[in-house]
Each structure stands twice: as C-alpha cells, then as structure tokens.
Image (spheres, grey):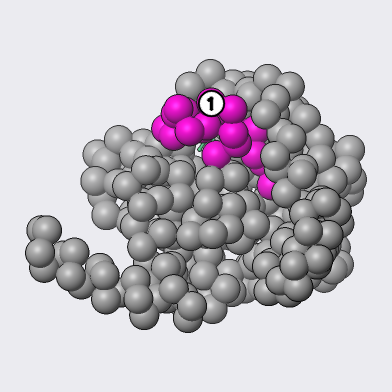
Amino acid sequence: MTESRAQITKAVIPAAGLGTRFLPATKATPKEMLPVVDKPAIQYVVEEAVTAGLSDVLMITGRNKRPLEDHFDRNYELEQVLRDKGDATRLSRVEESSGLGTMHYVRQGDPRGLGHAILCAAPHVGDQPFVVLLGDDLIDPRDPLLTRMMRVREEHGGSVVALMEVPPESIHLYGCVAAAPAGETDVVRISDLVEKPPAEDAPSNLAIIGRYLLDPAVFEVLRKTEPGRGGEIQITDALQTLAGEPSLGGPVHGVVFRGRRYDTGDRGDYLRAIVRLACEREDLGPDFRDWLRGFVTEEM
Ligand code: UTP
C-alpha cells in the first residue's frame, strides 16, 4: 500500500470498448466521441479529472482511436479560419479541449475487459495511486465526487470506489457491493463485490459507478485475475481480492454518491442526459425548454 497522503495526479480513462449498444454510430467512431449537446462525452470526463487536480491523463484506446487523440490536440487550420473570421467565441471553444491536461495514449490491443484496460496503464502510472474514470458516467461539476474520494483515501488508505443506490431491478446492470457503514454517512467499508448480479443474488442496492481511486497494488492483483463474467478480466474481481485481503493494498471503501450523474452508455439514458443538460444551458436552455413544453403538450 502506498502513502495515502501523497498527491494524486494521474487519471486513467479506458476508452477501448467496442460500444456495441450504440451501433451503427460507433462502427467507425469511438462512443466517447458522441456529443452530449455540443461537446463529446469524453471532454466532460477529462474536464472533471483536470478540475480535481488530475492533470496527467492517460487514455486507453483501441483501433478507432484517432478522433480521440485529434479532439484533445490542436487543430491549427480550423483555429486560423476562425481567427480570420474574427469568431472569438468558437475559437475559444475549439481551443478549450486542447488546453486541458497533459494527454497520453496507450493501446489496449484486444478489448479483454475493463480490468485488462486498466492493467495497460501500469507502466505509465507506476507505484502511485491513480483515478479511473469511465466515459459513460458524467458527474455534474456542481457535485464534486473525486475530491471526496481522495479525502476518504487520505483517511482510510487503500482504494475507494464510487457507489450509487439503485432500484433492485437495475442492479444487474452494475457491479454491486456488500458493505458496512464506516463512520460518515456517505462512506462504507466494502467486504465483497460481484459483477452484474441478478436482483435476487445482489448483496445490496449499492452499485459501482464509473469512478475508482485505486491503490497501485491493484496491478499485481489484475495480473493474476482470471477472466470472469463475459470472459473479460473484470476490475470488480480484482477489487474483490483487495477487499478480502487488505494486506495486499489496504482496504476498499465506497463513497455513496447522491449528486447528479448522467449515464451516457445506454441509448435511453443518453437521450435523457442531453435533454437535461440542454435545458440547463444558459445559451440554449430558455428556447429549448419552451420548445420542449410545447412538444410534450402537443405530441405526447
Ligand atoms: P462497457 O462495458 O460499457 O463496454 O465498458 P463498451 O464496449 O464500452 O460498451 P457496450 O456495452 O459494448 O455498448 C466500460 C468502459 O470500459 C472500457 C469501455 O471503453 C468503457 O469506457 N473498456 C471496456 C475498455 O477500455 N476495454 C475493454 O476491454 C472493455
């Protein structure tokens, strides 16, 4: 286990999955590039990492990686065109995504599971705690989750995962934990984890959402973790080993998040996320809400 007060600066964003739920949109485009209003989903996630002080971002990419790299790089030609037109607003929006953290990329090769994707980060991360962010979960910047997770690690050491209470009929879509209260109302100590259990076998209604603060001991455990559910190497299985043997890398705690989260990994939730975020936007919201009210009254 590493020193728990060491400042955490590295973020790992796995983005090598096949995104099959969004086919055919994701045939040639990573699902992380799908727009949520007018920004690709992945940009919200990188912004969240950088805001929490994680200025070193490693993206795990796959075969269709180019749009991801291009998005976080400069586009001189486009910038010049906007400059020549005197379009300062759009220019700053284009420059925003290339001025975030220091971006690094590594390829996963075959998508052998989220655990395997995280293991691809080992040479870059080294012996430091790090944060994993999944692009499917957008956390509202008004409800900072990562800084809370970092504080919990400072207090307890080990690893910390983000949890959310979900209705029993949805638990089979998530990793699920068995946990006991650990002092503060939003913190639990995790004793067991199971990936996507049927409702009747779920140990609780606490689902793992896409934020993990991991002790680097997880890499050694992942190297020894056999493929699990779906033939994939599961991070949930590695966390279960850590939770069962705290001598390996400290305990595993959970932060129960009760803030605003938008799930963009599922088509229905993705549409709901866009409508919610568009309604809240200062520039688009007023007109869009008026239209939506009319649409709901006349068409529904
Ligand atoms: P998902 O289980 O959501 O898979 O992965 P997916 O392929 O992205 O999407 P669907 O279910 O086929 O539509 C959770 C996260 O883990 C990454 C994905 O990119 C996603 O961010 N992942 C998954 C990898 O990077 N590599 C893998 O081998 C598997």
Q: Classify mark 1: helix, strand or loop.
A: loop
Residue at horizontal 37 percent and vertical 67 percent from the top: 276
- On screen, residue 144 above or below 97: below
Q: Residue at x 30, y 74 (%)?
A: 289
Q: Quick one: 176 or 293, which is closer to the camera?
A: 293
* Drawn side of residue 200 relative to residue 65, left or right: left
Quarter containing the C terminus: bottom left
Compared with 63, 211 (above or below) is below
Task: Quickly name the residue at label 1.
Answer: 27
* Residue stretch in magenta: 13-31
* Residue beneath the point at 59% across and 34% down: 29
Left or right of 155 on screen, residue 57: right
Q: Position of residue 293 (x, y in %)?
A: 20, 72
Count of numbered labels shown in the rendering: 1
Q: Quadrant of residue 85?
A: bottom right
- Of residues 230 and 152, the one drawn nearer to the viewer in this rendering: 230
Quadrant assignment, res 172: top left
Decide if residue 287 is on the left or right side of residue 217: left
Q: Residue furthest front?
A: 85
Is residue 157 shown to the viewer in this render?
no
Quick one: label 1, few (<14), some, or many (20+) residues within 10 Å? few
> Is 105 or 216 nearer to us in this picture?
105
Residue 15 magenta = yes
Secondary structure mostly seen in magenta is loop
